[in-house]
Amino acid sequence: MPAAEPAAPGPRPGLGRGFRRLFGASATSNLSDGVLQAALPLLAASLTRDPVAVATVSALAFVPWLLFSLPAGTLVDRVDRRAAMAAANIGRAAALGLLAAAVVAGVATLPVLGAAAFVLGCAETVHDNAARALLPAVVERHQLERGNSLLATAESVGNQFAGAPVGAWLFAAAASLPLWSGAGGYAVAALLVLGVAVRRPAAPARATDAGATTAARPTLRAATAEGLRWLLHHRLLRSLMVLTSVQAMCHSLVQGVLVLYALEAVGLGERGFGVMLAAGGIGAVVGALASPYVTRTLGRTHAMGVTGVLSAAALLAMGLAPHPVVAVAGFATSAAAVSAFNVQVMSVRQALVPEVLFGRVQGAYRTVIWGGIPLGTLGGGALASVAGLPAVFVVSGVGGIAIGAGVWWLLHGHRADIEAGFATP
């Protein structure tokens, strides 16, 4: 086991005013994300109980990651990343406003809902790539895991602990309410992010390689290819990308049918579904906050291995014992492990990838990982229609455990490379 890392600074280290503004913008936009995480599946389920149709709506939100994540990553390396985040949030606010109006007018069909999910996903590719690329310009390298931990906490609180139950409860009152509130949240986040102060330029994109800048800006295609080549030639990140993409696909099997699992297999109502999502939010908050401590205690590679396996084992338990208590506890445990793993793996990428290339590398990385999620989501819907909802969780859990063990083995063999990345100024 690697030696324990030095203790982190106190509970309120000087991450700076810029980080505080970024945190506020992230918390606000993630609250809107959370409201939609409950409201959109409930809206789909109110239109049909066909698991394939419900899963298709969820899948359409992830298709843009397969189609546009690469060019979006190049874009955020060429413009001010704060402006990119603001523009994406304004686009999401407009899309939600139109969907809310459609719901009020009674014309919100499944195709309309699917189109809205797709547009929201397109804006998310720009926003999320820019947000992750912006952090290294806001905090120092040795503060990355703390910064990612706090941002992941805001994401978990907004997406699940606060936003998801609020979205479910607002939907129970009126189907359009969570959509209007989500649109307002994105508009506020757009204003907040424009005030983020940076330590280094937020748009470092005039690079033709990782170590040089020139006055001539490469074409969009050349710049995108540069980031992709860098990633494919990095043995550790290339292998980690492949394994985590398969693991994400295993997890996504349950994503499109989660609402049906809660409503039908477990017997929770709409408000109960919100409670289950809130329990997952609590777990995700705990996982994000505990991630730096787990890393110091177990060592970085062992911490990532444990959390990767645990996240899938909890889903397996939900499939083997579809009971309300097991469902809530298992979802909370899986969310905690996923949240901790995401903090750890994001910090590793930020430490290893040159900042000038980060947007493009992140775009390529997420194209592979998130691009497979629609396939997993649709596969979960198809499997549920044939074998039942609990079977989806069993398959997801078994596959995820196997891949998680592979990630653990990979990271253990590259401990020195990982720690060297964090030691680089």
Image (spheres, grey):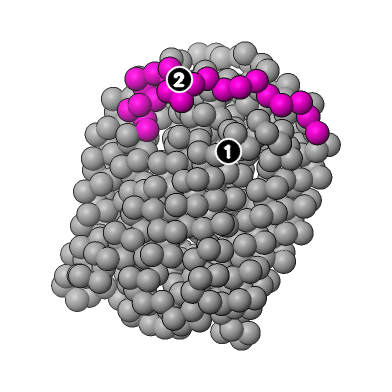
Residue 251, image quadrant:
bottom right
Front in this rendered view, residue 208 or 203: 203
Query: Which label number is shown at residue 304?
Result: none
Residue at 61% in and 76% down: 321
Q: Secondary structure at mark 2?
A: loop
Circle 2: residue type: Pro
Residue 77 lies, with reference to residue 142, above or below; the image says below
Question: Which comes before the other along the chain, label 2 or label 1?
Answer: 2
Residue plotted at (37% across, 30% down)? 22
Distance (Cα) linking label 2 and label 1: 16 Å
Relative placement, left or right, of 337 versus 285 is: right
Q: Quadrant of the C terminus?
A: top right
Provide residue 359's location: percent of width, then percent of height: 53, 33
Query: Does residue 288 appear in this view?
Result: yes
Which residue is at the front of the view, 183 or 222? 183
Q: Is residue 102 visible?
A: no
The residue singled out by tag 2 in the image is: 13
Secondary structure mostly taken by the magenta-highlighted segment of the chain: loop
In the depicted view, which residue is nearer to us: 60 or 423?
423
In reply to whether residue 154 is colored magenta, the answer given is no
Taking 108 as reference, is 246 left or right? Answer: right
Quadrant hosting residue 311: bottom right
**Percent of width and height locating residue 181:** 22, 54
Residue 14 magenta-highlighted: yes
Residue 268: percent from left, percent from top:
41, 77
Report the amino acid beneath label 1: Ser
Find disc 1 in the rendering and name its residue.
291
Give, as a single range, the part of the protein colored magenta. 1-23
Indicate the quadrant containing the N terminus: top left, top right, bottom left or bottom right.
top right
Residue at 28% from the left image edge and 45% from the top image edge: 186
User: SS at mark 1?
Assistant: helix
| Side of 330 where 411 appears, left or right | right
